Image (spheres, rainbow, N blue to C red):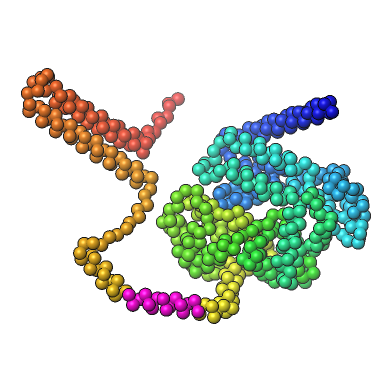
Amino acid sequence: MADENVKQETIDIDTTSTAKKDSRSRLREITEVLRRHKVTKGVTPEKLRLILEDLGPTYVKLGQIMSLHSDILPKAYCDELLKLNTEVRPMPFSMVEEVINHSYRTDWREIFSSMEQTPIGSASIAQVHKAVLKANGQEVIVKVERKGIYDTMARDIRLLHRAVKILPSVPSLRNIVDLDMVLDEMWTVAQQEMDFLKEASNMEEFARLNKDIKYVTTPKLYREYTTAHVLVMEYIDGPSITDVETLKAQGYDLNEIGKKFVNSFIKQVMDDGFFHADPHPGNVKIRDGKIVWLDMGMMGRLTERDRKIMVRGVEGIAMHDISKVTDAVLDLGDFWDKPNRDQLYADLRDFLREYESQGMGSVDLAEAMESLMDIMKNNHISLPHGMTMLTRGLSHVEGVLAIISPDINMMNIAYTRVSEDYFDKLRANWKEELSRNSRKLYRAGINSIEIPSLASEIMREYLRGHSRFNLNLDTTDNLVLVVDRAVRNLVIGLCIAGLLVGSSILCTTQMKPQIFGIPFLGFLGYLIAISAIIFFVGRYEIRKIRRWRREHPRKKKKKKI
């Protein structure tokens, strides 16, 4: 027994040692890539994309998740990270068999009568194979997780936390991004994508929420064959939503598809609060007159509160109501610093002025959301994760519309839906609304009777000099510094003046000892006061000279050859 324990401890030590060596080797590889791309000279958006591509598929996936953070990353970085290549070298089929057999605890041929060895698609987390079920002969898609991907990504995330500490500050990100926080959130999203049981639950929830929409469907899920590492679903053979030629050849109306596509997405966001966060053309197909939504690994969620606030924001943008948009932003966002409502109001006013001359049908909703994200970054406001995923989703939807039906405007459809929902609720609850509003009118009428007496009392207090006002003053750091310096200089000046006056009084006496016929204490007071005056005046003048030199730097003379 003792020998077995010693043997087990030896195995554990060897495993730990191997893991440490592997981490050190990977860290050296990361360091070499960073050195090759000269990160000490800064990290541009393109350079960041190239670095992630050189580091391999794990980092490509992390980069794609980073592109979701348009609330804290500059738009240029998010746009560049969206270009990351999603197709990676596939696993050998023998490794695919190993993952499936280990997950099912039996040979895959017991479940499938055949499986194509060449994958339909291969990404950083999983790859997809076409197969035929043995039980009913149905063609299915088998999504297989890459072997060891969880451990690899966990290791790389740990190493990235270490690498972040040696990366130089990116000027556009300084004082804005907590990279450790971003890495933690990326790891959370990646873990959800690597759990196929979670994706299966997403598919079931999406199907349930859209079961009454005749033109929307999802692939049939084979839950009995689905595990945490293997996902089995119905094979969809229809064309992509952006395959214009095939759709036209099959007799589809592209404008109709575009309107239904937008309505479906807006319904997911505004009604369900559960939406597809990655609706690029590869994840949306058309079959039998229906829009088929694929790949539910990345889904966005909005709380009831977030949805209501978002609807208010859309209404405010549509009606050019700055106060409404400002309130929606303040209610929705989390602040990294104390908010400056005046600055936010001014930024939103400039934002809405861009759309004053435009009609509802010409406002680009995705572009408007991106502009709002920039304003929020500048005002140190971060959005809930669901809202950042929504921005990415809107960009994909706008991209699809630009191809199949560029005349359709998503903002117009969204506002129309908001208006219809409002009037539907108003008609459904008109009795309740009438009762509530009548109570408000009654209370307002009762309170208005007291207005003359209250006004008379206020004037009486004012004439007696008993009126009081409460003021809340919000100060900036610069104002606090100026006031602090002014008060300090005033106190020092009073002390020096008191010292001079006191010394002058002592000089009128015959106190001994004396210096030059002046009492010693009076002489000492004069000396201290004059020294203090010279010190403070000199320091003030030196500061003025330094400030002037900073504002008027000298031009370096060119050396003559």
Residue occupying the point 54% across, 38% down: 169
Residue 433 is left or right of residue 289, and the answer is left
Residue 423 against residue 241 in the figure, above or below: below
Q: Nearer the viewer, residue 266 or 240?
A: 266
**In the rendered image, which quarter is residue 494 located in?**
top left
Quadrant that contains the C terminus = top left
Q: Which residues are magenta?
A: 435-450
Which of the 4 image quadrants contains residue 177? top right
Residue 46: x and y, percent? Answer: 62, 44
Quadrant location of the N terminus? top right
Q: Is residue 325 magenta?
A: no
Q: Residue at x 74, y 40 (%)?
A: 151
At 71% from the left and 30% from the top, the residue drawn is: 20
- Is residue 241 in view from this perspective? no
The structure residue drawn at horizontal position 50% and vertical position 48%, both measured from the top left corner, is: 336
| Picture layout, residue 200 above or below residue 16 | below
The reply, left or right, for residue 211 in relation to residue 234 is left
In the rendered view, tell whether residue 318 sits above or below residue 150.
Answer: below
Position in image of residue 489 (x %, y %):
26, 38
